[in-house]
Amino acid sequence: MKIRIGTFNLYQFAEPPFSWYTKKEKFTSEQWIEKTTWIKQQITNMNCDIVGFQEVFSKDALKELVGELGFKYFKTVDNAKISKNNDKIYTSTTVALASKYPIKNLHKVDIDFTALKKHHYEGFFKFAREPIKATISLENEKELDVYVCHLKSNRDNEFEYIFTKNTSMEEKLEKVSKALQDNYSISLKQRLCEASSLYTNIKRTKKPAVLLTDLNDKEFSLTIDALTNRKYHEEKRKNDKFLLLDAYHLDEKEVYNPHPEFKGLKRTPTSYFAGKGNVLDYIFVSNKFNKESKDSIGEVVSYEVLDEHLQKNQNGSLLNSDHAQVVCEIKFS
């Protein structure tokens, strides 16, 4: 069997008359119709069986929307918070999960308190957005643990290092450790604690797992190491060993008639800031979906980024989204 899974940051999904963050930030009825019409078309284009959503304020409106598209099962684990001063203003977002297959169980993702100590986190800690962990029943008695998360954003534009594929974890840790100890980047510290908590939870699960996320961090970031790599958490380990893999790298990409100076494919950005493209939206999968693994039960057969709206306007629009949508297809052995 094959399943298609996707991640979709909806960008301020707040049904009027509700506002987000400030009173003036809200949609008119006409704008809401335009936005939801675009979202429906985009979900149709994604052609998924399972979708994780971020930036959800109005969960009931989203449940109705995806229900019209054949998603019989819909779950959230939190409510968007309302301002104490105005009951028509949302002050926080949530994540959501829609599935065409039955959602069997919801589980809480506990905080890893050892990670708080490791990252010099002081005071009360909670996820910026409570993540979802759900067990989904597929065909032929197969089950899949699906995580949906939206990690802490760098909203204050604090200084954070940018790494490349050639940067070793040791170099990343060396550069970031002082920032963590001296509180140069509170947002990064929060993200690393969130990623570590997810890692610990996924490590304990017995089922194959996928994680659908707006990571709010770039490719090759230390956040990805904290989320996926045992070496980050096991100080005595000398070699990388990955708990999760970026589905992008498991999709075999064919290049036809490459130019003599061709230097490889460039990954499509999923978001833009100040004219620069970044990959912020990811699908991570268990090593069990790596066909090279001895424990393989399936493989990633396609990986797509739906970014036509960003090609027209890099900043996106409130009437669609400021993120591209990511989809991967998995074939079970």
Image (cartoon, rainbow, N blue to C red):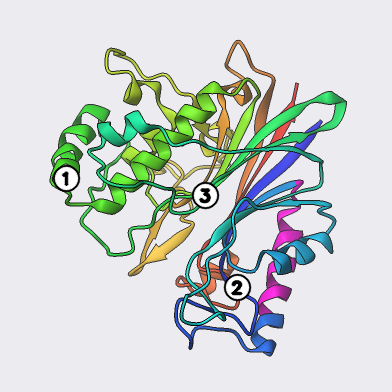
Q: Residue at x 27, y 29 (%)?
A: 169
N-terminal of the pair, mark 2 or mark 1, is: 1
Q: Secondary structure at mark 3?
A: loop
- What amino acid is at disc 3? Glu
Q: Position of residue 10 (x, y in %)?
A: 59, 65
Task: Point out the image quarter for the N terminus.
Answer: top right
Circle 1 SS class: helix
Q: Label 2, label 1: how many angstroms apart (C-alpha)?
A: 36 Å
**Image position of 60 with respect to 292: above or below:** below
Q: Which residue type carries mark 1?
A: Ala
Identify the residue under disc 3: 130
Residue 205 screen position, x and y as percent: 59, 24
Circles 3 and 2 in contact, beta carbons < 8 Å: no
Which residue lies under the disc numbered 1?
Answer: 179
Task: Judge by depth and name the residue closer to the eye, 105 or 188.
Answer: 105
Q: Residue furthest front?
A: 84
Numbered disc in front, either 3 or 2 = 3
Dot 3 or dot 2: first in sequence order is 3
SS state under label 2 = loop
Q: Is residue 84 visible?
A: yes
- Specify start and end residues of the magenta stretch as a single range: 34-49
The residue that label 2 is drawn on is 320
Along the line of sight, the residue nearer the viewer: 154 or 332:
154
Snapshot quadrant of residue 293: top right
Quadrant of residue 221 within the rendered picture: top left
User: The residue under label 2 is which amino acid type?
Assistant: Asn
Q: Residue sitting at 49 percent across and 35 percent down?
A: 110
Label 1 to label 3: alpha-carbon separation: 25 Å
Which-is-in-front pick, marks 2 and 1? 1
Tell me how many marks there are. 3
